[in-house]
Amino acid sequence: MCIELNYSNSKINNLNYQNIVMKESLLSSIELVHSNILKEVSIALENSETEEEFKNYFLGNIFVNNIKNISNSQIQNTTIRIPSKIIYDSSGLITFQIESTFKQDNYTKKYRANVEINTDLNFFNTSDEIENKFETLGINNLNKFTDTYDKTINYEKENNLESENKTDKILDSNNETINNDKNIENDKVEIEDENNIKIKNIDPSSIVTVYDYKEI
């Protein structure tokens, strides 16, 4: 009777230990996939110029294969799969699931977690912002030219200057406008670069959420 009881206790202890090992392996593997996702998001941010490019990066097989790869870790007897289709909704959220499976001898355990990636990074709003700033710069310079032109005409009327002098002054104003147009283009490039840097500097962890870890 004592022998049977000891055997039973030993078996229970072994099972408890095995459950702990499996759980640790499964949770560690999901955390590793989370890390892989952050790396992929960083790559997508660096190489995307539009929201569409950024979104499409996560809808291909390369992304899926990269995040499932845990071969460089010390985690054993554990495999990763994406059990369902990656979904992109109108709000800009990409959602999918991670499924981790541990198998060793007669022991099997599975864990699943949900993933969200927010692709609504205002790529298009940034473009609109650039155009608005560009238009504002153009209007300001147009107003400046108009003011200069009007002041030149009024000044020459008041002082009865010759028509030739008028033409020269207007030409000078035109040259100033051309220079202002060049400045507008330079300002537009600077604005584009500034907004591009903002997008590139987004922290991947701020737009990636892994949640609802559970055994299945």
Image: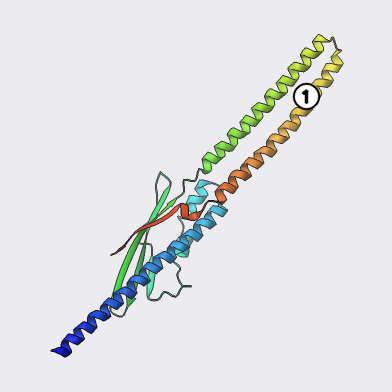
Vertical order, 74 against 192 (above or below): below
The answer to which of 106 and 202 lies nearer the viewer is 202
The amino acid marked with disc number 1 is Ser
**Which residue is farthest front?**
2
* Relative side of 137 to 26, left or right: right
- Residue 57, given in percent of the width and then of the height, sits at 49, 54
The answer to which of 96 and 34 lies nearer the viewer is 34
Instruction: Name the residue rendered at 32%, 66% in the picture.
Output: 111
- Residue 127, given in percent of the width and then of the height, sits at 56, 39
**Which residue is farthest left?**
1
To which residue does mark 1 refer?
173
Q: Quadrant of the C terminus?
A: bottom left
Tell me the crowding category of disc 1: few under 14, some 14 to 19, or many 20 or more residues within 10 angstroms, Cα based.
some
Q: Quadrant of the N terminus?
A: bottom left
The answer to which of 168 and 88 lies nearer the viewer is 168
Vertical order, 45 against 133 (above or below): below
Instruction: Name the residue rendered at 31%, 80% in the picture.
Output: 105
* Relative side of 105 to 198, left or right: left
Instruction: Name the residue rendered at 51%, 51% in the picture.
Output: 54
Residue 209's image quarter?
bottom left
Q: How many marks?
A: 1
Instruction: Name the residue rendered at 44%, 66% in the picture.
Output: 32
- Residue 76, given in percent of the width and then of the height, sits at 40, 76
Vertical order, 113 against 182 (above or below): below
How is colour applied across the structure in the image?
Answer: rainbow
Residue 10's image quarter?
bottom left
- Residue 161, given in percent of the width and then of the height, sits at 85, 12
Name the element at disc 1: helix
Vertical order, 141 against 11 (above or below): above
